[in-house]
Image (tube, helix red, strand yellow):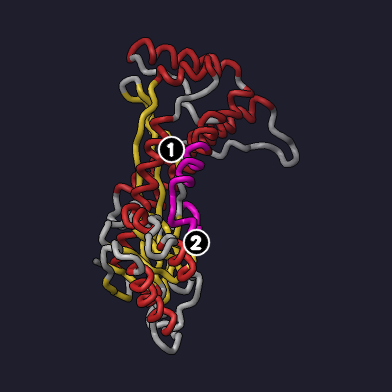
């Protein structure tokens, strides 16, 4: 701390307006000191879990600085004027705008909401597999291996959540235009959301293929009935081992296209026959054309663990642009690999 206790008052007396302003200034000093402390601690450790915790706490302290400063502005008009004067001086000397970036308040909230809606519309796996949300700041989750026949956990261990991120920029010209038109061009943010969503799908698919407890063979599915018979064979083994419904079959878009073709011999789409067998057949761009995944979609088999979910952070100005970072943390938690079948051609 850089100061003594600011509250040296007789018991029962309340702070005056001037004393409250002084207390807020000292609070800002304390928060800035705390930010430096936590960032220094983060830079001094190689433990990634501890590093993320220190960095996350530092971000929270930055929020507190903003809260105290907002209160101080309401009490000290001279401070408001000097802040504006200082921003003008910086702009004159360096060309850096001292204005708040979009999204610090209402605009940022609107952009964050739009990005999340767009990302949720792209994601496929979250709509068909169990999802567990643990929240921002959680870096790891426990797993109990339930693959033994007597249903007693074979072991208990911890898996780390992986961080995915995309950085994008919105031009100052776009922000200036938004002030006039009332609508911000969010196309760079939406493009980043699309990339983040696809990266998430690839990460989950990669993990499912690595942890699959069953392997099977499939053909190209060009012949009528081949898809149904091959999936039925994989499904029968899963049912025989006690893995319950619902079942989900994940395929590539090109293989899905073969399933919607109507064969002359049967007069029906293979897709309809497969859905009668497994319930859901889902096209996932992250899958290769020569593979498919059959999954018992139950929490005792697996779940998609989501920590930070499509978080939007402002980085700062750079060459006439405002940089943002879109990020999330996630992990695939597999409790029983026997409920996941990897089918390859």
Give how far across and how far down residue 41 sits, in percent. Answer: 35, 49
Quarter of the image where the C terminus is located = bottom left
- Indicate the secondary structure of the residue bearing disc 1: strand
Within 10 angstroms of label 1, few (less than 14), some, or many (20 or more) residues?
some
Residue pictured at 33% horizontal, 72% vertical:
230
Q: What is the quadrant of residue 21 in the picture? A: top right
Q: Is residue 104 above or below residue 86?
A: below
Within 10 angstroms of label 2, few (less than 14), some, or many (20 or more) residues?
some
Viewer-closest of 125 and 114: 125
Report the mark closest to the observer, 2 or 1: 2
Please identify the residue farthest to the top as the structure is shown: 92
Viewer-closest of 291 and 212: 291
Q: Is residue 132 above or below residue 246?
A: above
Q: Is residue 131 magenta?
A: yes
Residue pictured at 39% horizontal, 47% vertical:
197
Q: Which mark is residue 313?
A: 1
Residue pictured at 40% horizontal, 74% vertical:
339
In the image, taking residue 326 as reference, residue 111 lies left or right, namely right
Residue pictured at 49% horizontal, 56% vertical:
127
Give how far across and how far down residue 281 sits, in percent. Answer: 43, 61
- Camera sees residue 203: no
Give how far across and how far down residue 315 sits, in percent. Answer: 38, 33
| Residue bearing the label numbered 2 | 132
- Indicate the secondary structure of the residue bearing disc 2: strand
Residues marked 2 and 1 touching at CB (< 8 Å): no
Viewer-closest of 251 and 75: 251
Residue numbers of the magenta segment = 114-136
Choose the circle earlier in sequence order: 2 or 1: 2
Count of residue discs: 2
C-alpha distance separating marks 2 and 1? 23 Å
- Camera sees residue 258: yes
Viewer-closest of 291 and 74: 291
């Amino acid at each position: 701390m850089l100061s003594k206790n600011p509250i040296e008052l007789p018991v029962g007396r309340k702070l005056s307006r001037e004393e409250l302003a002084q207390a807020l200034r000292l609070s800002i000093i304390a928060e800035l000191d705390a930010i430096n402390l936590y960032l220094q601690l983060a830079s001094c450790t190689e433990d990634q879990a501890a590093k993320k915790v220190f960095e996350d706490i530092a971000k929270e302290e930055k929020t507190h600085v903003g809260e105290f400063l907002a209160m101080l502005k309401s009490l000290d008009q001279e401070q408001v004027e000097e802040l504006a004067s200082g921003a003008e001086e910086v702009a004159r000397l360096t060309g850096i705008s001292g204005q708040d970036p979009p999204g610090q308040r209402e605009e940022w909230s609107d952009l964050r909401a739009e990005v999340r809606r767009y990302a949720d519309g792209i994601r496929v796996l979250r709509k068909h597999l169990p999802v567990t949300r643990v929240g921002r700041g959680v870096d790891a989750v426990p797993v109990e291996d339930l693959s033994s026949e007597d249903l007693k956990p074979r072991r208990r261990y911890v898996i780390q959540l992986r961080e995915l991120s995309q950085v994008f920029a919105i031009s100052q010209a776009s922000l200036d235009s938004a002030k006039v038109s009332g609508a911000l061009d969010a196309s760079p943010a939406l493009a980043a959301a699309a990339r983040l969503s696809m990266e998430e799908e690839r990460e989950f698919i990669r993990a499912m293929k690595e942890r699959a407890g069953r392997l099977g063979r499939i053909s190209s599915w060009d012949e009528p009935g081949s898809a149904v018979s091959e999936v039925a064979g994989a499904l029968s083994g899963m049912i025989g081992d006690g893995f319950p419904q619902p079942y989900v079959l994940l395929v590539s878009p090109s293989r899905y296209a073969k399933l919607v073709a109507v064969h002359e011999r049967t007069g029906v789409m293979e897709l309809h026959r497969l859905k009668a067998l497994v319930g859901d057949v889902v096209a996932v761009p992250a899958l290769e054309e020569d593979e498919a995944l059959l999954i018992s979609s139950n929490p005792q088999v697996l779940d998609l663990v989501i920590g930070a979910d499509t978080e939007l952070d402002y980085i700062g100005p750079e060459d006439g642009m405002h940089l943002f970072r879109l990020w999330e943390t996630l992990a695939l938690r597999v409790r029983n690999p026997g409920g996941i079948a990897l089918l390859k051609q």
